[in-house]
Image (cartoon, grey):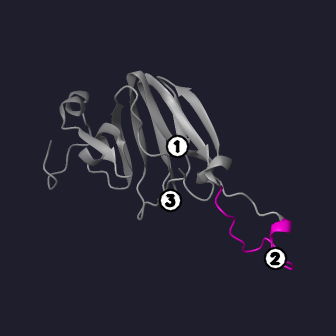
Amino acid sequence: MPSPTTPHHPLLKADEIETAPWRTLAHSLKPEAVRTQFSMSDAVGMKNIAVHKSRLEPGKESCLNHYHLNDSEWIYILSGTGTLILIDSSPSLLSQHSLPSGSSLSGAIPPPPKPEDMHREERAVGPGDFVGFEGGGGAARYSHSMIAGPGGLEYLLGGVKTSPNVCAYPE
């Protein structure tokens, strides 16, 4: 691989990806969530888009369940199987009777849901499956993480790079 000051040719060959130094990453808030990945986008000098080839060992979780307030994110499953864990952590709307007399919903910030009120959904994923998450105000609807099945899981992970990258962790 070229040095950080020498840009890579835009074509990154499959053998370069497989023989490159992959990084093992433990999530800072959930150290048992460990994945191994290689940043293909960094290798070719892309600054505004992230594309990583990632691997999860059997039974490992990709990260702490989260959503992005600014960044959109996507996952494409290459091989193996796993479970996509989705949590709806959308703020609940305040009911009129819970507001002080004379108040309206205008400008009110809904409270975050209690963990026991969050809806959890688990979906099986396998080769060829695509998952996309739009960042922004509605992102809390699909807070997400993945757990690898018995044979492990290999996938592409990507999205836009905005600054700051703000994540929320409903669990």
Which type of secondary structure does the marked residue at label 1 adopt?
Answer: strand
Q: Amino acid at mark 3?
A: Asn
Give the mark toward the camera: 3 or 1. Answer: 1
Q: CA distance from mark 1 to mark 2?
A: 35 Å
Instruction: Find out whether the residues at labels 3 and 1 contact each other: C-beta distance under 8 Å.
Output: no
Whether the magenta-drawn stretch holds residue 29 is answered as no
Is disc 1 surrounded by few (<14), some (14 to 19) or many (20+) residues within 10 Å?
many
Residue 144: which numbered mark, if any?
1
Q: Which residues are magenta?
A: 96-113
Instruction: Find out whether the residues at labels 3 and 2 contact each other: C-beta distance under 8 Å.
Output: no
Seen from this angle, which residue lies furthest bottom?
102
Q: Is residue 45 left or right of residue 50?
A: left
Task: Check the picture and name the quadrant holding the N terminus.
Answer: top left
Q: Amino acid at mark 2?
A: Pro
First reached walking from the N terminus: tag 3 or tag 2: 3
Vertical placement of 39 versus 106: above or below?
A: above
Give the mark toward the camera: 1 or 2. Answer: 2
Give the mark toward the camera: 3 or 2. Answer: 2
Q: Which residue is mark 2?
A: 100
